[in-house]
Amino acid sequence: MVTSHQDQRRQLDMLLLTDAIVSLVLGTAALMSPHGLLQKIGGGEYSHSAHEVLRLYGCLRIAVGWIIYHVRTVDDGRFRRTICEALFFCYMLQSAAVMRAQFTDRRNVVNWIAIVLLTVIGFGYGRFRFSKGGDMIKVYELPQNNKIMR
């Protein structure tokens, strides 16, 4: 049973690492997005306000990625469990917001990609927090000898 908890801990660390890398890459891409790309996505129209919001979201993603990357080394089970809950709700709310935009405004492929990506990552965190054993602190704080990319 201890091995199962250690495996879950390693899987959670891998999810955190994947999320951190994706957040850093997408955040950097959003921050550096050129005007022409936004004009193309916007159907030929450029919106300075939308571009600024995208850049601010990029800054937020970079910060979240940095935090998530460093959370992997924290061994406080309650803190890691709370992070899983927060990230689950955060990704589900983002997915719902993009889904609403997809069905009430101009539809595009970028929204579908965002919906799938946000939902998959959200369910990943939800699996650890709300599935069987998700309330057990052992899943979050068992010591691990070989950390993934410290």
Image (tube, rainbow, N blue to C red):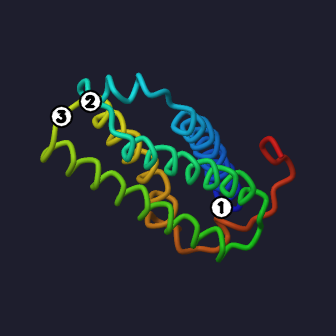
**Hey, what amino acid is under mark 3?**
Arg
Q: Gap between marks 1 and 2, in whole Å?
A: 57 Å
- In the rendered view of the protein, which quadrant contains the N terminus? bottom right
* Residue matched to label 1: 1
Does residue 124 appear to the left or right of 143 in the view shown? left
Label 2 Cα crowd, 10 Å radius (few <14 / some 14-19 / many 20+): few
Q: Gap between marks 3 and 1, in whole Å?
A: 47 Å
* Residue matched to label 2: 45
Of tags 1 and 2, the one toward the viewer is 2
Q: Gap between marks 3 and 2, in whole Å?
A: 15 Å
- Classify mark 2: helix, strand or loop: loop
- Classify mark 1: helix, strand or loop: loop
Mark 3 / mark 2, whichever is N-terminal: 2
Image coords of residue 140 (percent x, y): 66, 66
Residue at 58% x, 49% y: name it.
Answer: 59
Image coords of residue 92 (percent x, y): 36, 57
Query: Are the two marked residues, 3 and 2, in contact with CB atoms closer than 8 angstroms?
Result: no
In this rendered view, identify the residue nearer to me: 14 or 144. 14
Image coords of residue 117 (percent x, y): 41, 40
Q: Pick out the residue farthest to the right.
A: 145
Does residue 38 appear to the left or right of 85 in the view shown? left
* Residue matched to label 3: 107
Above or below 31: residue 66:
below
**Hey, what amino acid is under mark 2?**
Glu
Label 3 Cα crowd, 10 Å radius (few <14 / some 14-19 / many 20+): few
Mark 1 / mark 2, whichever is N-terminal: 1
- Classify mark 3: helix, strand or loop: loop
Above or below 96: residue 129:
below
Which quadrant would residue 105 be assigned to in this image?
top left
Query: Are the two marked residues, 3 and 1, in contact with CB atoms closer than 8 angstroms?
Result: no
